[in-house]
Image: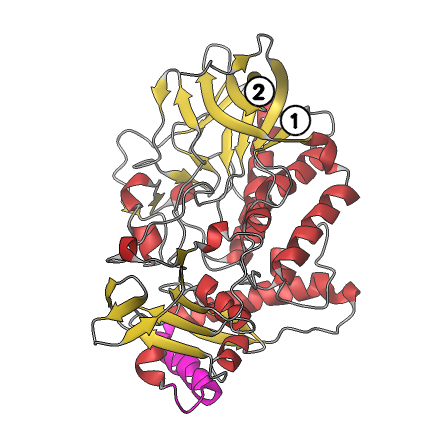
Amino acid sequence: MGSLPEKTNTPETLDLIVVGAGISGINSAYRLQTEFPQATFAVFENRDSVGGTWDLFRYPGVRSDTDLYMYGFTWNPWPYPKAIGQGNQIKEYLETSVSKYNLGRHIRFRHKVLSMYWSSKSAQWTVTVSHDGVHKEFKARFVILGTGYYDYDTPRQAHIPGIENFKGQVIHPQFWPEKFDYTGRNVAVIGSGATAVTLVPALVKKAGRVTMIQRSPSYILSVPDDDTRPAWMHPFLRVWSTIFSWFVILFCKYYPIYAKSYLINKALPQLPKSVGIDPHFMPRYLPWEQRLCWAPSGDFYQALHDPRASIVTGAIKRVTEKAIEMDNGQIVETDVIVPATGLRTLLGGHIDIRVDGEKIEWGGRFIWNFSMIQDIPNMMIVMAYVNIPWTINADLVTTRFFRVLKDMQKRGARTVVPRVPKDSTMKSEPFSPLTSTFYTEVEDRMPKYGTSGPWKRKVHIPFDYINAHWGDATTGLEFHP
């Protein structure tokens, strides 16, 4: 066995620690710097650069699956004349946001948070971090988890029968090799979600043949990409896009049959004659029971007009050394398999979290106002809507939590903790309202929503905005001196 990592002896003490320098962490740092200029805080980032998802994902064509007017920060509007941002553009935008507001001075790269231990006696978190082989301890009154909702280290392992027999290359989109050359090679993309819909039009430009294999179809909506409107309009476009998206979601919820018919009829004229709407574009679920996929300028449908692109719908029987056999007897010969089958859902990274010695598991705990977890003191976790860009609710979560911090200052409180009354008969709702497999398969390990008060899921953006800024921010919380 090798020697254990060195551990420093004198912990640095801060007011707050932010975990993660992606969208959530950058936004939290800006808000902290603006609203609590005297506070001492640090952002710990395991990677060498900011960006989170947009620093990790490097697969061909990687882009946003939402409108960047909504996805961008309110305090630094999206500057490019494209509503759908390419991965490198988004990464550049985040780096520019950090540089413009001098947030880099708070970010400590290659700092991986291993554990967080809360002591009620000292009213502090002890956070253990690994940095270049050395374990360091930090003390902080508050921790903000901006770690996203999926596992950065391990992709979701979908069951693909016989995949171990395949003699070609299996490449997960989450870990796409930087210099992988697929020119002239046959590629099979397994999946029908946003990643698969992004990969197909990008891969077909160089690959010999690209086959998208889907167990069941998704709804794919063509959306405009280029936008020549002046930059001064972008903040207004953010408001418009947010409200419009909210109305679309409401329409899908209350008039699902009409929404289904609309989406299918929009797809039909964009398809080549060789590709039928049934079964390839007839989802088994209603709109927004799973995420809606976007195709900027209809690029996915355009790709299907290329004779090198095809789509296969059905169950995989088995994978052989050189091909994928379908239940219906169809055989897809391929050199490369790309399992674009979703992400491994995970909250809080792999951090060992303990409160007064008790190990914290997320499962069974209620979520307070999208931002705190039942019985965990002085900790905010950034979560967001599943059908609206992450940044919008990340900012609302931060706004509400900072109101709590300011209220604590007035009270002279050192500790705040969400509590569900012991005699409560409140029913629970699942972590995600969507039926996507990568959510449902981890439901028992995820926190849950209640059906009333601050524990209820937030779904109405205009009202959530009002509530976050001016609504009740104390019900369900216990304050201790």
Please state if 409 lies on the left or on the right of 292 as rendered: right
Q: Secondary structure at mark 2?
A: strand
User: In the rendering, at what x and y percent does residue 34 appear?
Assistant: 73, 37
Residue 335 part of the magenta-drawn span: no
Residue 411 vertical placement versus 278 (above, below): above
| Residue that carries the numbered disc 1 in the rendered image | 41
Number of labels in the image equals 2
Amino acid on which disc 2 is placed: Ala
Please state if 70 lies on the left or on the right of 182 as rendered: right
- Please tell me the numbered disc located at residue 289: none
For the residues labelled 1 and 2, say whether their Cβ atoms are less than 8 Å apart. Answer: yes
Between the residue at mark 1 and the residue at mark 2, the CA separation in whole angstroms equals: 8 Å
| Residue that carries the numbered disc 2 in the rendered image | 140
Please state if 392 lies on the left or on the right of 197 as rendered: right
> The N terminus is located in which quarter?
top left
User: In the rendering, at what x and y percent does residue 439 appear?
Assistant: 34, 51
Q: Is residue 378 visible?
A: no
Q: Is residue 167 visible?
A: yes
**What residue is rendered at 77% in x and 38% in y?**
102
